[in-house]
Image: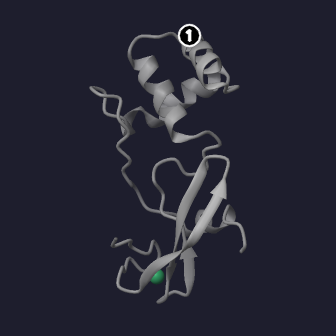
């Protein structure tokens, strides 16, 4: 896997360096030996408390015509997730561009400049 370092934009000296765990699951961390820094690639769900599947489900349900209340109830019933309608609406606004409208499949894209500061705030120390 050619993972580019967000800082020097190089992939030559980048390799896997363990995992980062949080509420949304496990993420691969990388080490850039040029910068001597580690980083986690932004998969579009950076800083999300909830798992990507739930966000995806919420957005695709809403796009299928469910009301925010129905999406919320749907997720509460089947996913045992306590989220608010506002949360659902925020997800839809923020992530619907990341989702294919036809299939509801997750299509993560890295867009825009990456902010290095944000990379390290949420990374737990080993
Ligand atoms: Zn680097």
- Residue at horizontal 64 percent and vertical 68 percent from the top: 120
Displayed quadrant of residue 107: top left
How many numbered discs, if any?
A: 1
From this view, report whether residue 22 is shown above or below residue 61.
Answer: below
- Residue at horizontal 55 percent and vertical 59 percent from the top: 27
What x and y, as percent, mark residue 91?
A: 53, 32
From this view, report whether residue 91 is shown above or below residue 27.
Answer: above
What x and y, as percent, mark residue 48?
A: 60, 44
What x and y, as percent, mark residue 44?
A: 46, 49
Few, some or many residues within 10 Å of mark 1 (<14, 14–19, 20+): some
Pick the residue in front: 19 or 14. Answer: 19
What x and y, as percent, mark residue 18?
A: 57, 72
Q: Is residue 4 left or right of residue 83?
A: left
Displayed quadrant of residue 79: top right
Report the quarter where the N terminus lies.
Answer: bottom left
Pick the residue in front: 76 or 64. Answer: 76
Q: Which residue is mark 1?
A: 70
From this view, report whether residue 96 is shown above or below residue 75.
Answer: below
- Residue at horizontal 39 percent and vertical 55 percent from the top: 110
Q: Is residue 76 left or right of residue 96?
A: right
- Residue at horizontal 51 percent and vertical 10 percent from the top: 67
Pick the residue in front: 7 or 72. Answer: 72
Q: Is residue 7 left or right of residue 49?
A: left
């Amino acid at each position: 896997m050619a993972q580019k370092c967000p800082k020097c934009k190089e992939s030559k000296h980048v390799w896997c360096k363990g995992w980062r765990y949080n509420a949304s699951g496990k993420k691969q961390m990388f080490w850039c030996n040029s910068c001597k820094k580690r980083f986690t690639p932004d998969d579009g769900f950076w800083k999300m408390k909830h798992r990507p599947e739930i966000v995806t489900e919420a957005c695709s349900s809403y796009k299928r015509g469910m009301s925010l209340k129905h999406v919320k109830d749907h997720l509460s019933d089947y996913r045992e997730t306590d989220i608010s309608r506002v949360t659902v609406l925020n997800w839809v606004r923020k992530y619907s561009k990341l989702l294919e409208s036809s299939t509801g499949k997750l299509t993560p894209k890295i867009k825009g400049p990456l902010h290095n500061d944000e990379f390290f705030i949420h990374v737990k120390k080993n």
